[in-house]
Image (cartoon, rainbow, N blue to C red):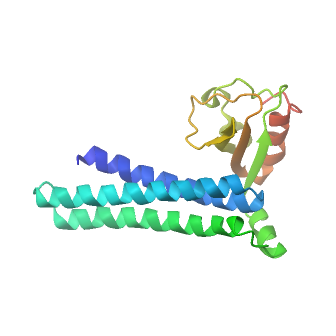
């Protein structure tokens, strides 16, 4: 495994694990089983990627391409990402088991500095048919889209070239102050980003 491959695999595990935490909390806030099930699927992906990564690191040690201490450090980073993914799965398990949350728990999630918003892109939305990279949503609203539900499937690899479509259900994360403006943009209430 090359140094670049190792970096890419570790980064992918880290980013997916962080995203899973967002999805897991969102599944609770929005009472959404689809999001919780997506967390389960991602957790299995992380498990597989972690196992593959560890095997490659051990193989590199055997082939004298990697020092044992370096391999141990890299494997520990991968295990940490897997532990975060496992925790996200445990959070989403609350949703899948239909556990009724105490109102204080839900309120504490909603009162955090970072908020989650779920909106549908309306036909009159200024965001419709726009690339995320072109509209600079995060810098202008303080909200960034972390997932899109399109055609019954969640897309969680949202990038600057991703185009928003009418009917997309978007999950966004950001600062509380940007929530109302983002919602108005998605619904067509505001036409100026």
* Image quadrant in which you'd find residue 168: top right
Vertical order, 193 against 8 (above or below): above
- Establish if 182 lies above or below 62: above
Expressed as whole percent of the image width and height from the top left, the position of residue 140 reads 71, 37
Q: Residue furthest top?
A: 129
Q: Percent x, y for residue 32?
A: 74, 56
Q: Residue at x 71, y 65 (%)?
A: 95
Q: Is residue 142 visible?
A: no
- State the quadrant of the C terminus: top right
Q: Is residue 24 visible?
A: yes
Most extreme residue toward the right is 189
Q: Is residue 161 left or right of residue 73?
A: right
Vertical relation: 74 (above or below) 162:
below
Q: Residue at x 36, y 46 (%)?
A: 8
* Whole-percent x, y for residue 157 in the image: 55, 41
The residue closer to the viewer here, 32 or 159, is: 32
Q: In the drawing, does residue 37 fall left or right of residue 187?
A: left
Q: Left of 102 or right of it: where is 40?
A: left
Please tell me which residue is depicted at 69% across the width and 35% down the height of the picture. 151
Total count of labels: 0
- On the image, the x and y values in percent for residue 145 come to 66, 42
Q: Nearer the viewer, residue 125 or 192?
A: 125
The residue nearer to you, when weighing 41 against 186, is 41
């Amino acid at each position: 495994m090359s140094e670049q491959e190792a970096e890419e695999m570790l980064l992918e595990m880290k980013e997916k694990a962080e995203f899973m935490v967002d999805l897991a909390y969102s599944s609770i806030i929005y009472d959404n089983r689809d999001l919780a099930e997506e967390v389960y699927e991602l957790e299995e992906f992380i498990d597989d990627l972690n196992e593959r990564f560890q095997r490659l690191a051990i193989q590199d040690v055997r082939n004298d391409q990697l020092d044992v201490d370096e391999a141990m450090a890299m494997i520990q980073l991968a295990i940490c990402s897997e532990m975060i993914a496992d925790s996200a799965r445990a959070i989403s398990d609350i949703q899948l088991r239909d556990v009724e949350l105490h109102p204080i728990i839900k309120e504490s999630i909603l009162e955090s500095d970072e908020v989650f918003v779920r909106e549908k892109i309306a036909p009159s939305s200024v965001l419709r048919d726009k690339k995320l990279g072109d509209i600079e949503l995060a810098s202008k609203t303080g909200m960034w889209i972390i997932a899109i539900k399109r055609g019954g499937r969640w897309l969680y690899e949202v990038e600057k070239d991703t185009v928003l479509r009418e009917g997309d259900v978007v999950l966004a994360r950001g600062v509380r102050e940007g929530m109302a403006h983002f919602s108005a943009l998605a619904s067509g209430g505001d036409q100026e980003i």
